[in-house]
Image: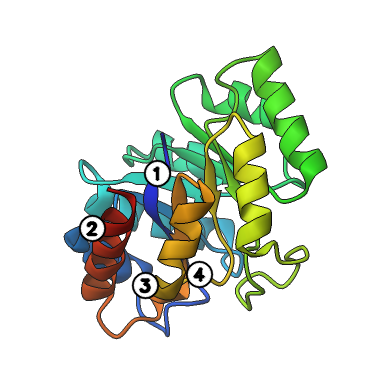
């Protein structure tokens, strides 16, 4: 499943001024297998540049996804970048239309938080299998990286959602190394982190530590 295990959301606002490509390179060296690029503070042109730059490091090593901007994903593909898909939210273009735009082989993740959103997403896949590849579920905790996050779910809420969804769930929202046991025991297929790698003094070492903890908890 796309997003399984430790999943890096590489947020342009959370890297302490360091280039996104530098963090991507370090995370790949640390063993990360999924990277989602989020650049809400960037213009389309600037975001495209970052996607192309990061793809040079992730190519052949990690799945690279573009947050929200289907247009930037398509432009990056047209430019020859090795980028695998997109992750969208509830207020973005409807998932069925996104799937038409990106084609059947690209990865498509969808953010979902409420029981109604989880039910709707699973219904979409029941009617048209393969439309959505995985769900990003949260926020598990309150987080400053996403100001409009819904009421935090906690581990209990995450577990209820994971058990009710046929689609694999990747937990997100204020998560770090201390959350690995709680997230893993909830039944989530993966755990997305932002500042735990982006803001780390040594992103490579932080990535290795998270992966070791996850593997030790889920093996």
Nearest to N terminus: mark 1 or mark 4 = 1
**Which marked residue is nearer to the observer: mark 2 or mark 1?**
1
Question: In the rendered structure, are the residues bearing label 4 and label 2 in contact, judged by CB atoms less than 8 Å apart?
Answer: no
Task: Report which residue position mark 4 lands on.
Answer: 175
Q: In the image, which is nearer the foreground, mark 3 or mark 1?
A: 1
Looking at marks 4 and 2 on the same chain, the residue that comes earlier in the sequence is marked by 2
Q: Secondary structure at mark 2?
A: helix
Depth order, front residue of 152/51: 152
The location of residue 148, given as percent across then percent down, is 76, 67
Q: Is 171 in front, or is 8?
A: 171
Horizontal and vertical percent position of residue 105:
44, 22
Q: Residues within 10 Å of mark 1 (few under 14, many from 20)?
A: some
- The residue sitting at 71% across, 23% down in the picture is 124
Q: Give the number of the mark in front: 4 or 3.
A: 4
Q: CA distance from mark 1 to mark 4?
A: 15 Å
Crowd around label 4: few <14 · some 14–19 · many ≥20 (10 Å): many
Can you see residue 205? Answer: yes
Residue of label 2: 28
In the image, what residue occupies the spot 63% across and 54% down?
A: 158
Please state which of residues 114 and 41 is positioned toward the viewer in this rendering. Answer: 114
Residue 4 marker: 1
The numbered disc on residue 90 is: none
Tag in front: 4 or 2: 4
For marks 4 and 3, give the CA distance: 11 Å
Query: Which residue is at 65% across, 65% downward?
Result: 154
Instruction: Tell me which label, 3 or 1, sits earlier in the chain.
Output: 1
């Amino acid at each position: 499943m796309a997003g399984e295990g430790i999943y890096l959301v590489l947020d342009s606002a959370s890297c302490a001024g360091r280039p996104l490509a530098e963090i991507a390179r370090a995370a790949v060296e640390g063993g990360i297998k999924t990277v989602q690029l989020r650049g809400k503070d960037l213009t389309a042109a600037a975001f495209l540049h970052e996607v192309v730059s990061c793809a040079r490091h992730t190519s052949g090593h990690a799945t690279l996804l573009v947050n929200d901007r289907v247009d930037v994903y398509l432009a990056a593909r047209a430019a020859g970048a090795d980028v695998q898909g997109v992750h969208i939210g509830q207020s973005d273009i409807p998932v069925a239309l996104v799937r038409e735009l990106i084609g059947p082989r690209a990865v498509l993740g969808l953010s979902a938080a409420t029981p109604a959103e989880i039910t709707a997403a699973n219904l979409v896949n029941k009617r048209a299998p393969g439309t959505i590849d995985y769900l990003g579920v949260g926020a598990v905790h309150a987080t400053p990286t996403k100001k409009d996050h819904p009421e935090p779910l906690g581990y209990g809420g995450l577990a209820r959602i994971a058990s009710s969804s046929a689609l694999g769930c990747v937990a997100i929202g204020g998560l770090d190394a201390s959350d690995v046991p709680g997230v893993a025991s909830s039944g989530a297929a993966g755990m997305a982190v932002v500042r735990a790698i982006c803001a780390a003094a040594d992103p490579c070492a932080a990535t290795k530590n998270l992966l070791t903890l996850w593997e030790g908890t889920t093996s």
